[in-house]
Amino acid sequence: MRPLLFFLLSLFISTTFSSCGETERDQDLETLTAREVALSYHVFDDALREVHRFAMRDSLLNDTGIVQRFNSCIEDAYVSDTVAVFPLYLTINYGGDTNICDDGFNRFGVIRAAFSGKYLNKSTVVTVTFDEYYKDQFRIDGTVILTNLGLNSDGYMMFDWEVIDGHITGINTNITWEGEHEKTWVAGRSFESQSNVDDDIFHIEGISKGRNSRGNTFENEITNPYVADYSCQWFTAGTSSLDIPNLEARRLNFGLTTECDNLLIERRNNTYLEVEIPY
């Protein structure tokens, strides 16, 4: 009887300590990758929004002739020439790290954008780079290439959106990220509303890949378009599949409604985990 009791006690202790020693990756409850994929989309989409806002309100880069209104955190912004002879180079300087923008976020450093033609013209290529640029505590590096594809069969303007050598660093954060996407401008492009950039809505489809802060690789494919509603800082809808080596495939969901928040749901089989984008 005693040997049996000793065996059962030993098995219990072994199982207990084994389960306590398992990491979230061992238990397949890892959410870091989902959070960092969402963060990557957020910061690079945000940088494009900053360029979009300026381009839509500058008559050299656009045909609207709308008077530019600077964001309160921008120290200075200028285009390389005073006539529409392309390429033109846009510089947006957010200054030091104490400036708070109109949307409540902190941006500092410089965003540069080279325009091969007017922003709304088919085949125009906009190349965006960064110079010591941060959004809040995250430094953003890499090259973003936005190509105007013209109007699709439904009359919506489309862009090819490519991120090359994307890199996001911060406290306990070191992400590499790149992707190829199509952006479809589905609302807010009418002449009457061009002065109100906040009513612009884009649908984003495509794939991305990278490496998270723990060194694990991932691939992400958008399965239902991410909705970038410029009245909200975060994507308001959309789903994607997330593949991480040696883990079950995940499904990321930004929501079925247009609620504006920094949350998404990560699903693994029948396990649902709420993930907060770190903003």
Image (cartoon, rainbow, N blue to C red):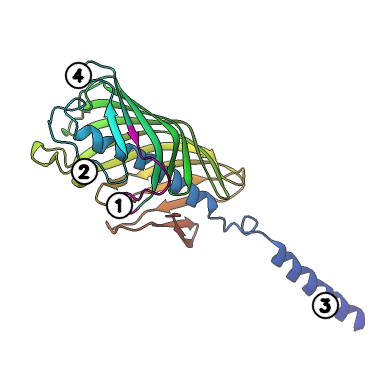
**Which SS class for mark 4?**
loop
Tag 1 or tag 2, which sits nearer the N-term?
Answer: 1
List the residue tagged with mark 1: 103
Q: Position of residue 104 (x, y in %)?
A: 33, 54
List the residue tagged with mark 4: 84
Report if residue 242 lies within the magenta region: no
Amino acid found under the numbered disc labelled 4: Ala
Foreground disc of the pair 2, 1? 1
Taking 150 as reference, is 45 above or below it?
below
Q: CA distance from mark 3 to mark 4?
A: 81 Å
Taking 5 as reference, is 233 above or below it?
above
Q: Position of residue 19 (x, y in %)?
A: 70, 66
Q: Residues within 10 Å of mark 2 (few under 14, many from 20)?
A: many
Tag 1 or tag 3, which sits nearer the N-term?
Answer: 3
**Which SS class for mark 3?**
helix
Task: Answer left or right for 174 relative to 95.
Answer: right
Amino acid found under the numbered disc labelled 2: Asp
List the residue tagged with mark 3: 9
Q: Quadrant of the N terminus?
A: bottom right
**Which SS class for mark 1?**
loop
List the residue tagged with mark 2: 200
Magenta-tinted stretch: 92-104
Q: CA distance from mark 3 to mark 1?
A: 59 Å
Taking 222 as reference, is 236 above or below it?
below
> Observer-nearest residue: 186 or 270?
186
Report if residue 94 lies within the magenta region: yes
Amino acid found under the numbered disc labelled 3: Leu
